[in-house]
Amino acid sequence: MFLDLHKVLLALLYLSASCGATSPSLSVIVTGARDMDSAENLKVLVSLVNDGSDAINVLNHPQGPLSKLPTNTFAITDSKDARIEPQFMGIRLKYAQEKAAKAGDYTTLAPGEVVTMEHYLSEAYNFTFRGSGKHEYHIAPKDIFYVVTSPGANSTDTPKITPITAKVTAHLANISSSIPPLRKSHLSRRKPSYANCTQNQQISLTNAALVAQAYVSGAKAFASSLTASTNSSRYKTWFGAWSASRHKTVVEQYTAISANNFSTYTFDCSCAEQNTFAYVYPDEYGHMYLCGAFWDAPLNGTDSKASADSSPPFKLC
């Protein structure tokens, strides 16, 4: 039944798109079963429609519905209390946005065109935390999308990436609290090792881990040396105006990060995503999956192998 409703709503979106907005404009509609009581029907269809009068290129960003990766794509809350949400158990990753845009990793939508993606919610969210029974949830994807403007076939310039806010039609569903999550833990409890990595990749990872260790040790030393009178522009750029409590938090964070021994992580080289550096499951601490952008990156510097290695405990999104 929900497929019929899905078609009706898409038709309405198409009619609204035919009015022809002059600037990039997207509408998003989420549909699915009204009652979800098994892992098989704990899924939604997400459709994007180009409301504008020109074709647009929408980046296949891993935090959005155009990607099939189990990231935190959706805002899912109890319909009566927005403070109640399922446990997110998917992946956190570092994404090479400019690299993806240059590589053409986007979906092109003509005016009025619709693209639909299917998402199994139990691959990224755990609804069993509420014990038993069914609860009504409000399900909507994040409303920020990224439009890529190509500089032209003969240009060496970086494509322009512009964030736009989409008009979202959410879905309400009664979801059973007894549906188990689909993902099984891949974490090996054995000693640190490499999985699916070539000899050259292992050597590269060993070197990156050493540089990453130096990065965090240096960051800890730098943060610890600061005082209210230091007036460090570097500190302000990353953390904002000085305050004793904020500085204390920064030092505590870097102290915790520097306690990690990156050379003892388990590294998995099986990821095939070309425009992602790396990803982790938050509940698999010390297990890191390396992707295509990691192998293309330099050993050190911004967006390097070392910066990716030092990211998992701290700033993957």
Image (cartoon, rainbow, N blue to C red):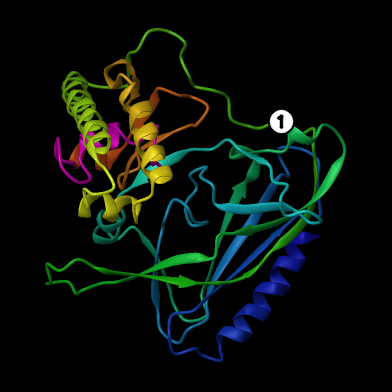
Counting from the top left corner in percent of width and height, residue 135 is at 83, 46
301 left or right of 27 in image: left
| Quarter occupied by residue 191 | top left
Magenta segment, prevailing SS (helix, strand or loop): loop
Counting from the top left corner in percent of width and height, residue 127 is at 72, 38
Query: Is residue 270 at all visible to an observer of this figure?
Result: no
248 left or right of 283 in image: left
Q: Quadrant of the C terminus?
A: top left
The magenta stretch spans residue 316: yes
Residue 89 vertical placement versus 246 (above, below):
above
Counting from the top left corner in percent of width and height, residue 168 is at 62, 69
Which residue: 62% across, 54% down?
75
**Residue lying farthest to the right in this orientation:** 133
Q: How many marks?
A: 1
Q: Label 1 neighbourhood size at 10 Å, few (<14), some (14-19), many (20+)?
A: some
| Quarter occupied by residue 208 | top left
Which residue: 43% across, 85% down?
23
Residue 173 vertical placement versus 57 (above, below):
above
Label 1 secondary element: loop
Which residue: 16% across, 20% down?
203
The magenta stretch spans residue 30: no
63 left or right of 277 in image: right
Give the magenta range: 297-317
Q: Quadrant of the N terminus?
A: bottom right
The residue identified by callout 1 is 180
Name which residue type carries label 1. Pro
Counting from the top left corner in percent of width and height, residue 104 is at 29, 61
